[in-house]
Image: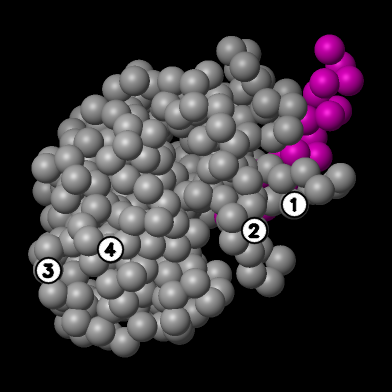
Amino acid sequence: MNLSDIIPTDFSGSLLISRKDEILYEGCFGYADTANKIKNQKNTRFATASAGKAFVAVGILKLMESGLLSFDTVIGSILHFDLKGIDPNITVYQLLTHTSGIPDYFDETIMDDYDELWQNYPNYKIRSSSDLIPLFIDKPMLYPRGVKFQYNNTGYVVLGLIIEAITGVDFDKYLCDEVFLPCQMDDTGYYEFDRLPPRCANAYIYDKIRHDYYTNIYSVDVKGTGAGGAFTTVHDIKRFWQGLFKGTLLSDNMRHNMLSVNAQGDNEYYGLGMWLERGQNESFTPHFEGCDPGVSFISSRENDGTVITIVSNFGQNVWEMRRKIIKEIPKYDNLH
């Protein structure tokens, strides 16, 4: 597949297109470490920002299939800290679908840059989901629970806390045992910036004043939470989709529920931890994505089973790249 006209000449990151067990295209571009000229490779681990919400959703759904949780379970019956003004009757389903109205520590409707959070609260303090509680616990509800869909990062932080309350282990350890290992996602995990394992790419932000790039280590949580922050490889994401559709992770019924429209806003459709792109004949394409300073990620499973995963450690426009690739795939198929 010739994608030379689609991939920007300055693109830094990784791209994988596959269908079932066949790799249609694979490419690695730019540097994981610009200062030391270490190139991005097939097994480079990239930060993925909010993409981790899909993993958390699967983790929650697995607890449901084990009988330890239900969609109607309310947070007041699980969480053992003072919720203050937060409605204790918010349900797990409302958290999963961004309809809870819970106060959002990073409200993307009024805040532009994630690094704004750390002006008065050092990011190095965030090493667990519970470390984010001070950033939202004293805020008022955004709206009464269940009233509408509004993307909400706190909701998934709380889902991570629910996993910990039920299982007694850190949410990322649970996801490793119940999601990553069963799918053989050996290069996926939640890592602290000051304790990164091998092959992790730096993420870079452009400085408009000095006209150079700097890493995002002071711009995001020092370790990911339920809201996002997992490191992974494009091949591990392929394995995640395979595990999801082969029944390794969830039953067929639960997967169908996860990838069905559960909430919607203005031309936006959401399943459970997954975005849904509306196509022709009322069909929907599931995808999950993430965007942080220096980070951009998207992975989709098209209706024919094609998986497109693109990640950039320079925060480049992976969404436009995916749109162009979708148009290119039929041309490739016609040649085979």
Disc 3 and disc 2: Cα gap in Å? 32 Å
Q: Amino acid at mark 1?
A: Arg
Read off the residue under disc 1. 278
Read off the residue under disc 4. 75
* Mark found first going from the N terminus, 3 or 1: 3
The x and y percentages for residue 76 are 24, 66
Quadrant occupied by the N terminus: top right
Disc 3 and disc 1: Cα gap in Å? 39 Å
Disc 3, SS:
loop
Q: Amino acid at mark 2?
A: Tyr
Residue at the image position 24 percent from the left and 47 percent from the top: 163
* Mark found first going from the N terminus, 4 or 2: 4
* Mark found first going from the N terminus, 1 or 4: 4
* Residues at marks 4 and 3 touching, judged by CB atoms closer than 8 Å: no
- 278 with respect to 93 (left or right): right
Residue 102 is one of the magenta-drawn residues:
no
* Mark found first going from the N terminus, 2 or 1: 2
Label 4 packing within 10 angstroms: few (<14), some (14-19), many (20+): many
Disc 4 and disc 3: Cα gap in Å? 10 Å
The x and y percentages for residue 114 are 35, 70
Is residue 191 at least partly visible in the picture?
Answer: no
